[in-house]
Amino acid sequence: MATMEGKDAVAQYKPKLEDKTGRAHIIEIMHINKSFGENHVLKDITFYIRNNEFVTLLGPSGCGKSTTLRILAGFETADSGEVEFEGSDLLSVPAHKRHINTVFQRYALFPHLNVFDNVAFGLKLKKRPKDEIKTRVSEALKTVGLSGYETRWVDQLSGGQMQRVAIARAIINQPRVLLLDEPLGALDLKMRKEMQIELKEMQRELGITFVYVTHDQEEALTMSDTIIVMKDGVIQQIGTPIDIYNEPKNAYVADFIGESNIIPGTMKKNEEVTILGKTFTCVDPLFPEFKEGEDNPVDVVIRPEDIYVKEEGPDYVNGTVTSIVFKGVHYEILVEDDTGNEWMIHDVDPVKEGQRIGMTVDPDDIHIMRKSEFSPDAPGAANSSDDEVSSDSESEK
Ligand SMILES: Nc1ncnc2c1ncn2[C@@H]1O[C@H](COP(=O)(O)OP(=O)(O)OP(=O)(O)O)[C@@H](O)[C@H]1O
Ligand SMILES: [Mg+2]
């Protein structure tokens, strides 16, 4: 069977890109650059995809996610760099000969064909025997939960069902890698959530490597084994959902991946950070380039759910509650501290607007990051959370 050959090939092939887990890589993307005219949309993109992994490219519109997928699929060329598929050059292989298939955001089904013929299309082109086509179509439809829909016309299907047909069509050739470009983008929230879980199950069941594209951070956190965060054609961070959430590498990732308070601070010594004149114990050492005893500037990330509300006091960061909104499970509380920074807190206990409170946090829940172009106080920083975090706070000393 083709799959067995594939697995053996993976086992024999020695990865070029270093990976501490020692797991097999199916695809290695090395130093890819791509420009459209003056627009440099992929800047030295390098990452690997492990066999059977669910990898997600996550980033805002225009950051180069689809362009990366299109290069993998063979619909777009790279200006420089290499891509290897199990150790062999991929870029010289024509799109239709790659063991890679794509599911797009808009389903691209044939409206004049029924479900069966849509799914069978590729096999019919390959002139496979009728019996085989029938068996494989019904297996693929079963996988996507559409058994019995063979004779339905495409325009009699819901958006979610159309997307399932598109997935069935993409998996029927048993590709080694499935590329999915915002496949749930056109679905409503409830259907999206259902399909997220189903897709993840399908991926495990089929043993196919999924490369998934989304700009929805929650979707990425829910589904992925590995997330690659991109911005403006540059990879900002690669890691597991837990890594990316708990240990964001810079203020951009911290802000993009969830609600967070990002505050300028300084570190003089290991495991101690000063924020707004108050010193807190944390778990991070000084970065190697830092000088002990000096005020080394850092960005501090504190998630809204990690802040404790106290009565105001000398050991806390004190401030005034400016708004409180019930969000179902918790209250979302906004607080302006005494130097004008805005903080977001998630707490199950309510406070009152105008109330004075103190805020504190456990050492474990303080995450220290290096300063970057995305720091809230970086020169010309476009604060991505917009007017929520008042830019006035930056002029305070
Ligand atoms: N064929 C093309 N010709 C010219 N510019 C292009 C082409 N394809 C993409 N671009 C540009 O390249 C950049 C990256 O586009 P890409 O489609 O990869 O972004 P994306 O991350 O997928 O965004 P989205 O979330 O909006 O789909 C954008 O600035 C886009 O306008
Ligand atoms: Mg896109």
Image (cartoon, helix red, strand yellow):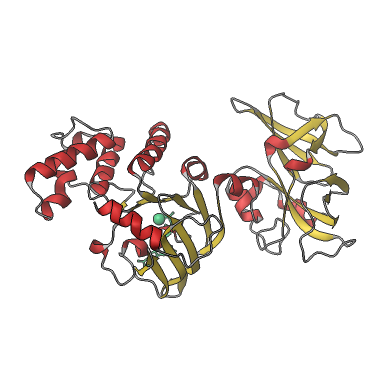
Front residue of 376 and 109 = 109
Total labels: the figure holds 0
Specify whether 247 is left or right of 213. Answer: right
**Most foreground residue, 33 or 287:** 287
Tell me if residue 181 comes above or below residue 198 in the rendering.
below
- Where residue 101 sits, quadrant-wise, is bottom left
The residue lying at 37 percent from left, 43 percent from top is: 203
Where's residue 152, x and y in %?
A: 16, 34
Viewer-proximal residue, 86 or 221? 86
**Left or right of 218 on screen, residue 300:** right
Is residue 166 depicted above or below 381 in this figure?
Answer: above
Which residue is at a point 85% across and 29% down the rendered structure image?
A: 311
Visible in this render: residue 69? no
Q: Residue placed farthest to the right in the image?
A: 314
Residue 217 shows up from this direction: yes
Q: Pick the quarter of the image with the C terminus.
A: bottom right
Rendered location of residue 9, percent (x, y): 34, 60
Residue drawn at 50 percent across, 54 percent down: 60
Q: Quadrant of residue 337?
A: top right
Eyeballing the image, is 351 above or below 164?
Answer: above
Does residue 281 appear left or right of residue 173 in this picture? Answer: right
- Locate ligand 1 by image quadrant: bottom left
Residue 146: where, in percent of width, then height?
A: 24, 33
Q: Residue at x 39, y 44 (%)?
A: 185
> Considering only vertical position in the picture, is 247 above or below 381?
above
